[in-house]
Image (cartoon, helix red, strand yellow):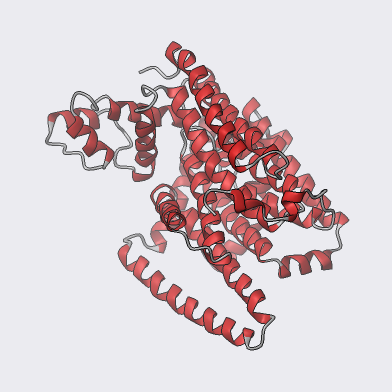
Amino acid sequence: MEGITALDYILLPFYLWLIYRVAYYYRDKFYPEGHAYRPYFIPGLTAKIFGAIFISMFYWYYYGGGDSYTFFVHSRVINSTFLSAPDTWLRLMTHQADDQNLTDSMALSQMYWYNDVASYTVARVGAFLGLFCFTQYLIINVLVAVISFNGIWLLFICFAQQYTHLIKKIAIAILFMPGPTVWGSGLYKDSLCMFAIGCLCYSAYILFEKKNFRFILIVLLIISILLLVFIKAYIIAMLLPAMILKIILVYKKKTSARFGGRVKFYILLGIMSIGAVFAAKKIISSITITPEDVIETIQHQKDYLLRVSLAQDGSAYNLGDFDPSINGILKMFIPAVNVTLFRPYPWESKSLIQLFNSSESTGVLLLTLYLLFTRNPFKTLKNIYTDPNLIMCLTFTLLFAFIVGVSTYNFGSLSRYKIPCTPFYMLFLMILIFKDKPEAKTLETLEEPALNHPLT
């Protein structure tokens, strides 16, 4: 089964024309001339589309496949039944295939990842998009990039509303970081996760902090959570507590300024804590996976990726065996966070793609060192303590970077797995570094920029 074909190149200009026509209409309608967000909309979309085309072509012509191609193969198998056996197509799309049915069985025999819910979810998304583009590999990747951009754009709006004097820095952190732009754009789990993360943060911000309760935002919140649960549940397991902590701190700041506010805050905190305990018990009782299973999975994944890395491209790193004890976690915490955020170092790069990844990690490291050595540490700690957004970003980054660092052991895989925390860590750095260096404000930034957005 072929990946990129001549039909891809024939259809690509038409789909790009259609996408940009809709994008320019949307931009002109919601972000007219002079609007603070307008300069970043089309460039942000273009970066995602370019990232999808680049990584699709790179993996197809250089490696002859990759995960994106395997997802596509599953998508094409699903859609091959659309006209000849629509009942089979529906069962495949709903993950209800009957192996006693001949057509279902033939399709299942060609899909290695059918029983992997996370991977098969991505394949089903690809199959659905394929209905609108003749199931062509390059076009599907571009459409996924557009979907991913929509979530990332909402994440940008979420923070741009709160830091109207730092919109350019927010755009760099969220829209234009190389890793998320490339690895979070094609037909990958990570692209759909980035979409869900952006939608989740935006929906929670508008619903619970701005108290603008709209049905579409509730639906978006639920879809985002379900998408993350199906594809990469560990992301929601670390992001949701950080977001809840932020919401609690926001309410604390709002209520502490009024008489009796602190009492109300602690009552609210107690209610939310009790609710969280009951919810956690309910979730745990409905899941058969135990903490021992999670540790065993981390160990197996680490061993597998390390073995493959050493046997193939030599892009392995080794932090030692994962010890789930308190002392073991503390011992490995800093090395794991370091490898996720700041490695591979330039001298560890053994291929062109690793050199690309190291350029981003080196830039992040230099920015971190700039913050540490040019800013008053006491003022920095005070800024973190008084800003719920910074606390959320740092909490999620550290938790996520640790889990990814101790379970990957391969720089190639790490470059993809770490992208959910990249925007949050970059936001953390940008806000702390440039908080006291405001950009020039336009009329729109001084007003309420997101009032023009269709979801607010």
Question: Vertically, is 375 above or below 421?
Answer: below
In the image: residue 378, left or right of residue 45: right
Picture quadrant of residue 133: top left
The location of residue 379, given as percent across then percent down, is 83, 66
User: Is residue 114 visible to the viewer in this orientation of the structure?
Assistant: yes
**Callout count:** 0
The location of residue 254, given as percent across then percent down, is 65, 75
In the image: residue 436, left or right of residue 246: right
User: Is residue 335 visible to the viewer in this orientation of the structure?
Assistant: no
186 or 119: nearer the eye?
Answer: 186
Quadrant containing the C terminus is bottom right
Q: Residue at image x 60%, y 74%? A: 251
Q: Residue at image x 45%, y 73%? A: 276
Quadrant containing the N terminus is top left
Question: Vertically, is 53 above or below 248?
Answer: above
In the image: residue 424, left or right of residue 108: right
Picture quadrant of residue 333: bottom right
The location of residue 36, given as percent across then percent down, is 71, 45
The location of residue 360, given as percent across then percent down, is 70, 38
